[in-house]
Amino acid sequence: MNLHTAGFKILLVFPFLFVLFLNSFGQNYGLGMATSIDSQETNTALNLSPDNPICLDGNFEISFEISSLKTGNVFGYIVRIIEDDDRNFDLVFNAEEPKGSFNIVAGDNRTRIMFNIASDIFLKQWNKITIRFDADNDRLIVSDGHNRYVEEGLHLKKKGCYKLYFGSNSDKKFKTNESLAVKFRDIRITKSGITKYHWPLDEHEGEVAHELINGDNGSVKHPWWMASQHNQWRKVCDFIVNGAASTAYDPKKDSLFVIGEDTVFTFAFRNWVLSSKPNQDKFKTNRGSQSIYSPIDNHIYNFLPDLKTAARYSMIDQKWNKTFPHWDHTDYWQANKVISRSDSSMYVFGGYGNWKYKNAVQRFSLKTGQWEEIKPIGDFFTPRYLSALGSNTQGDTIYVLGGYGSASGSQMTNPKNIYSMMRFTTKDKTFKKLYDLTNPTEDFAFSNSLIIDKGSKKYYGLIFPQRIYNSSLHLIVGSLNNSGYKQIGSPIPYSFHDIYSFADLFYSPESKRFTAVTLLRSKQNQTRVSVYILDGPPLDLLKSASSPKHDLSLLFIGLALFVALLSGGVLLFLRSRKRHTSADIQINPLEPNTKPDVSTKNAIFLFGGLQIFDRNGIDITKLFTPLLKELFLLLLVNSVKNGRGLHTDKLDEILWFGKSERSVRNNRSVNIVKLKSILERIEHCQLVKDAGYWKIEFDYDFWHVDYHHYLNLIEAKKKLNEEQIRLLFELTRRGNFLSNHNYEWLDKFKSEISSEVIDVFLIYANSAEPYNPEFLIQIASFIFYFDPVSEEAMIIKCKALSSLGKHSLAKKAFDVFIKDYRSIYNEDFNKEFNQII
C-alpha cells in the first residue's frame, strides 16, 4: 500500500494543516511581567488558582514558555507552586549565582537543581521549562528543553491541592513582590501526557487569563499582554527641535537620529535613552532637506537636491563637515531616498516644488561627492511625491510605491493619487512597473519609506488620506508579487500639512520592531517630533486574542473541515486498498524539523557549545555530520579570527593526514560540496576560496556570530568600560568556548580565550573607577568559572565583600578557595585571610 495515494495524502496532510490552522492565530502572544523597584505594588501578578486550589493526584507536570523582556535581570520569582497551603516549590532567578541563575527552592531549602539559559537565548526566543512532580519515585524533575535536572527525597505527596503564582502574588503566607521582567505563555498542567489545564495567555486586554479545557480562568493584576504589543502603536517619545528637523535611522544599532539646526538627537532603542549632541557650529537645516544614515561609512548625510551636494555628519567626531547656505524654496519636497551598497551611492527619486511634480532620479556618490541626474530607461515613472521607497539589502533593487502626481508633471493637469509599484535596478538604470494596487475605497498617500522583507516577498508601509489635516497613519502589508494589501494595527495620529509635515517608517531586524516618526514644523520654525513603536510581526486584534468562545468556534470549524476531508480520505483509501492489497508500505525518512522553535535567525553560537540557526530561525546544527562539523568549525574559527581562513595544505593536514593525495582531494571536494549545500540555507554567508585559502564570509550586518563580537570586545582589553565588561560577561556566560568539542587544533583557541577573558576582567577589576563592589563580586565569580583557583579573583571578591560589611561571606569565600586550592595542588595556600583583607 503506497502512502502517496490520494486518500493517504488527505489523511496525513490534514492533521498538520489543522494544527497549523489553530496555531496561526497567535504565535506572538503571552503575558509580560511589568516590574518596578520603586512601586512594586504595580508589578504584574498572575494567579491561576484565584478561587480554589488545583487538586491533583499521582504524577503531574507543569510546563510553560518563558522569555526575558530585557537584559540585566538580577533577581525575582518566576513561579511559586504552593502545596496544600503549607509548602512552596519555587523557581527563582538569581543572576549573581555562578552555578546557575535558575534554581528550584523547596520550602526553606535550595535544591541542587540549578541551570542557566544563555542571556541572548533567554532574551531573543521562547524557552520551554517543565517541572515534573514524580511522586511515585519521590523526585522533582526539571527540564529546560535541553537538559533534565533531578532532586530526590523531597517527600512529595501523591495527592495534593496546589496554588500557582507567576510573578508577584499577595498570598497571605507566601506573598512576594520580587518578580522578574519576563513574559510567559502556553502554561499547561498534564498527567500521563494528557493536558488537564491550559492557559495560552493569548489575550490582548482584560484581567482574565482564560483556561481552555475546564474554564478555570486565572486572574491577572496589572496585565501587560504581548499580543497588544503587535497591534497597538505606542508613543515612546515626543519633543521639540529647533529648525526644520529631519530623521535618519541605523538598523544595526537600532538608533534613531533627529537632526536639528543646533543639535543632533539620538534615541537608542536598546536602552531607551534619548541623548543630544550640540553642533559645534550652527548647522542650517533648510526646509525640505532630508537626512539618511549610511551603513557603508557610518555617517549621516543631510541633503537638499537643489544644492547638488550633501553634508556629512561623522558619528566618531560628532560634527558636520560643511554647512549649507540658506535656501527658501526646494523643488523636491517629500522626495524619496536610499543608500545603495552596490555602488556606494545615495539615490533620490521624485519630489514636488514650484507647482511641479518630479520624476527625476538623482545619484550622489559617497566616494567622490559628485551629484548627477540619471536618465532611466524602461517603463514610465510618473512624476510624483508622497511615495514610499524601499530596497533590498544591497540597495541595487529599489521599489517605489504610490504617491501623488500627474503624467505631465504639472499640478494644473489632472493630478491624482498614484498606486503603481515600480521597481528600479541600479545596474541597468531601468524602471519596471510591477502592478497597480487593488483599487482603494478611499484615496491615500504614503510616508517616505517601505520596509522590504526579502524572505517573504512582503512590504510594509504607512498610508494616510492626504486631504485631511487631523489625519492618521495606518500600517499596510502587501506582496511584491501581487496587488493585494491589507491594513493592520492601530492608527497613529498624524497632522498632515503638506510641506510642513513628514512621516517615515523604520524597522530593526534585531529587535523585530517597527518605528514610526512624525514631524510637524511650526511657523516659528520649530519641529515637533513624535516617535511610535510596534513589535513585529504586526497582528490584527481579531486574530491575536482568544477567549474560550473564540477558541471553540475555531475548533468547531477545524473539526468540521477535518471530518469532511477525513470522510473523503477514507473513501479514497478504501478504493485504493482494493487496488493495492499486496503492496508494501513505503515511508520516506523524515526531513529535518522545519518548524522553527526559536526566533533567532542567521546566528552561530560557539560559547557554551555549537548552535547554528538558519535564515528562518531553524536550528540546523544536527545537519552537520561529525566530519562536516569539524570542517565547518575549522574554517569558521580561522575565518573569524584572522579574516583569511585556512590554507588548503593545512586543512588537508588536519583532517586527512596520512591519506593519499588522491584520497585527500576526493574527500575535500565531497565535503566542501556538502558544506556549501548546507550553507545555502543561510543568507549573507558563503564559503569561498581565495589564493589557496578557504574561508567563510559573513555580512555581520545580518549575522550574529558570538565569537566575532567577542573578538571586537577583547581587542581593546585595557580600555573597556563597565558597559563593555557587562557585554563581555553576557557574551561568554553561555559557557566555555565550544565546550562539547575536543579537537587537538582547537586547544590553542580555548586556552587563548580563557586567558584573555581572565586578563580582561582582572585588568578592569584592578583599575575600575568608581569602585563598585557588587559588580566586582560578579566579575570574581565569573573568573572562577574559568579558573576556580584564581588567587587574584579570590582577593578581589574577599575585599569587595568586606567593603560591603559582609565579613562572614568574605571569610566563607576564602575558605572555599583554600579548599579548592588544596584539592588541585595537594598543598596548602600560603596566605592567611587577614593578609588578604
Image (cartoon, rainbow, N blue to C red):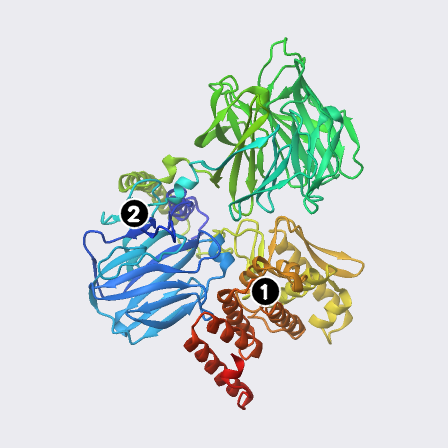
Where does the image place residue 699, in percent across and percent down from the top left? 66, 50
- Which of the 4 image quadrants contains residue 688? bottom right
Where does the image place residue 829, in percent across and percent down from the top left? 54, 87
Task: Compare residues 723 and 834 and report the one nearer the observer.
Answer: 834
Q: Secondary structure at mark 2?
A: strand
Amino acid carrying mark 1 in the image: Ala
Q: Is residue 30 above or below residue 744?
A: above
Q: Secondary structure at mark 1?
A: loop
Task: Give the CA separation, mark 1 to mark 2.
Answer: 42 Å
Residue at 52%, 37% (x, y): give it: 515
Q: Is residue 105 above or below residue 488?
A: below
Residue sticking out furthest to the top: 412
Amino acid carrying mark 2 in the image: Lys
Residue at 75%, 69% (x, y): give it: 650
- Which of the 4 image quadrants contains residue 556? top left
Q: Which residue is mark 2?
A: 221
- Which of the 4 image quadrants contains residue 414? top right
Whether residue 289 is visible here, answered yes or no, is yes
Q: Residues within 10 Å of mark 2 (few under 14, many from 20)?
A: some
Residue sticking out furthest to the bottom: 827
Task: Compare residues 401 and 521 and report the one nearer the observer.
Answer: 521
Q: Which residue is mark 1?
A: 768
Where does the image place residue 740, in percent across and percent down from the top left? 55, 70
